[in-house]
Each structure stands twice: as structure tokens, then as C-alpha cells.
Amino acid sequence: MIRPATPEDTAAVVDLVVAAEMFSADDAWLVEGMLADYFETNKEHGHVCVIDDEGGPLGVVYYQPKPAADRAWDLTMIAVRPDRQGQGRGAAILRRVEEDLRAGGGRLLLVETSASAQYDRTRAFYAKRGYEEEARIRDYWAEGDDLVVFRKALDAY
């Protein structure tokens, strides 16, 4: 079941993204802060956080409108528990995001990720779902680790 996130999900979501190696345990505070801001004010500004829940969070996605851009959105975070990866859960959550954005008139969805080998599967995941690599910024995350930007036009379907 895909449902809206609640403040009570915060600890489980942090554990999930750390387990999925999206963030290190030392960087978990970033996710905690993002969720605190979401529940405090950002939800009212169009940000969305949903959970794939089956007796506890198995996946999470967070997306938000791009400021000053016409109906463009940023997929800020998507993660699935490692023991549930490869079962279509990430694809289902992403499909839900795309459907919701299309229904609301969304035009473009952007995704930022890393070019490091650790994210090879991540980049393949987006490519398999029709996302195109749009840009690279060399040495963005660290020296030798480029930022890769993917895009998908939502009104193309």
C-alpha cells in the first residue's frame, strides 16, 4: 500500500535510507531534517512524501516542485529496503509519482544522482523507466564523482 508519510514514520524512513546506503549513518541527520521540514512547512508548499507500507515502510519517495520552473518537479529521494529491492517496489513507487504529477498537470520530472560505480544500478533503474541522462556536472559530489541529472517529460504519454 502506498500512503502519505506521517511524522511517526521518520525513524523507520531514516533507517530505511541508511540500510539502502542512500545516506550513511553519519548523514542520517540530513534525512531527519528534510522530514522535519516537510511536516513543519514544506508539505504545505507542494512537497510530497509517500511510503510503500506493508506492515512497516518498505520504500519511500520524496518529490517537490522546482521553484520558478513551469510544472517541473524534482525527485529528491527514492529508496527501497535492500531485502525488497528487485521486486518492482521502486518501479511501482516511481510510477505512482509520475501518475500523480501527470494528474496534477506536471510537465517534467528531474532526478539527480551520482556517477560513481556505487550508483550504476540506480542509473540503470532510471534509464529502464524512460529517463534520459540530460546533464553531468564534473566533480560535483567530490573529486571524480559527477552529478548526473536525468529527466522525463511527463506530458509525452
Image (cartoon, rainbow, N blue to C red):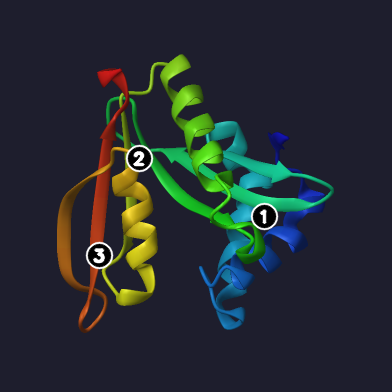
Q: Which one is earlier in the sequence, the residue at label 3 or at label 1?
A: 1
Q: Residue at x 29, y 47 (%)?
A: 127
Of 122 and 40, nearer the camera is 122
Kind of residue at badge 3: Leu
Q: Residue at x 38, y 62 (%)?
A: 121
- Distance of label 3 from label 1 (alpha carbons): 26 Å
In the picture, the disc for residue 129 is: 2
Kind of residue at badge 2: Arg
Quadrant assignment for the N terminus: top right
Up-down: is 41 above or below 135? above
Q: Would you name the residue on which mark 3 appears? A: 147
Of 30 and 99, nearer the camera is 99
- Distance of label 3 from label 2 (alpha carbons): 19 Å
Q: Would you name the residue on which mark 1 appears? A: 36
Eye-nearest disc, 3 or 1: 3
135 horizontally vs 119: left or right = left
Q: Residue at x 24, y 59 (%)?
A: 148
Q: Which one is earlier in the sequence, the residue at label 3 or at label 2?
A: 2
Q: Residue at x 69, y 58 (%)?
A: 13
Q: Position of residue 33 (x, y in %)?
A: 61, 62
Count of marks placed on residues: 3
Circle 2/circle 1 CB separation < 8 Å: no
Q: Secondary structure at mark 2?
A: loop
Q: Position of residue 92 (x, y in %)?
A: 55, 37
Q: Position of residue 136 (x, y in %)?
A: 16, 60
Q: Which one is earlier in the sequence, the residue at label 2 or at label 1?
A: 1
Kind of residue at badge 1: Ala
Q: Position of residue 73 (x, y in %)?
A: 37, 36
Up-down: is 70 above or below 49? above
Circle 3/circle 1 CB separation < 8 Å: no
